[in-house]
Amino acid sequence: MIPFLHLGPLTIPTFGLMVATGLLVAAYVLQADFDRRRENFLKNGYLKEEKESSHHDEGFLIIGIAGISGLAGARLYHVLQSPREFFADPWPLLFSRYGFAWFGGLLGGFIALAFLARHYRIPALEFMDVCAPAAAVGYAIGRIGCLLSGDGDYGVPTTLPWGMSFPNGVVPTMERVHPTPIYEFLTWLLIAVILWNVGKKMLRGGTAGIVFGGYLILTGVARFLIEFIRVNPKSFFGMSNAQTASLVSMLLGIILMFRIKSSPEKGNAAA
């Protein structure tokens, strides 16, 4: 593994490099989604006037703000999982380069996106639909940073031929273990493709929130299952904290889908 790149006097953490790459790629995906929906947005009077020029940069601004908020939420959620250790010496833990919780990132990013939806005058569910595929792509690429740094996000020991050891990782292990960051990378890319295609169909008519609801359910299921082979400690009813958060994500997605299905207002997302 390569936790750091040494370029002369510079030392660059590969985790941070991949997170930055993930945010950049996510911004391009989000901008592409914004652009394919732009005609509908303008027709419905959603976007602010100054955003109707030929210079479209919504994706990069949104990802920049939501990405920073998501990282802050992921870090805060992670350290608060061990409150005694955190409050004993909070600052080193807060500003460590390692330890980010997926559900905290989801919450932090969601809060930022709720404010951004108001800024762009786009209904919240439609805005979340636009952001969902980009969020999946950004997360997928960020997981490669976990793989390169060997930060302990790997799985339990395995005899499968693709098992990997992390002797030079930040959290080293000589055992061959499940490379769960690779599993997550491939799974979240697949989720992004599914959500992108669902969004494409929604342009021809559908109800706002379908893509976002799918994101909550699919990512919740994926993370819940992957946790069975992760090395995270168990807490609630024999589940890890991430599994508990995944159940919350799935439940919220199912409730959203049920409300959409039972809503009398159909087909308003792409009208």
Image (cartoon, grey):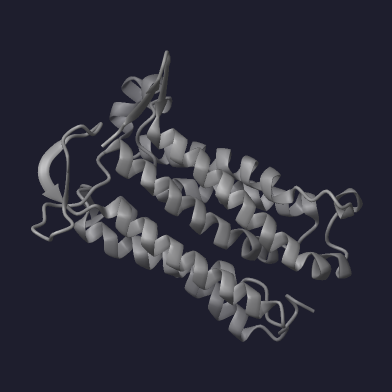
Residue lying at the far top of the rendered structure: 9
Residue lying at the far front of the rendered structure: 8
Would residue 2 be seen by someone viewing this image from the given angle? yes
Which residue corresponds to the image point at 55% horizontal and 77% vertical from the top-left? 257
- Residue 69, x across and y down, in percent: 57, 40
Report how many numbered discs are placed on residues in the image: 0
Would residue 237 be seen by someone viewing this image from the given angle? no
Residue lying at the far right of the rendered structure: 49
Which residue corresponds to the image point at 33% horizontal and 33% vertical from the top-left? 83
Which residue corresponds to the image point at 56% horizontal and 62% vertical from the top-left? 133
Picture layout, residue 212 above or below residue 12: below
Q: Is residue 233 left or right of residue 209?
A: left
Which residue corresponds to the image point at 89% horizontal and 52% vertical from the top-left? 53
Split into 4 quadrants, where in the image is the C terminus? Answer: bottom right
Picture layout, residue 263 above or below residue 180: below
Q: Quadrant of residue 39?
A: bottom right
- Residue 224, x across and y down, in percent: 31, 62
Q: Nearer the viewer, residue 241 or 203?
A: 203
Split into 4 quadrants, where in the image is the N terminus? Answer: top left
- Residue 54, x across and y down, in percent: 86, 52
- Residue 164, x across and y down, in percent: 17, 49
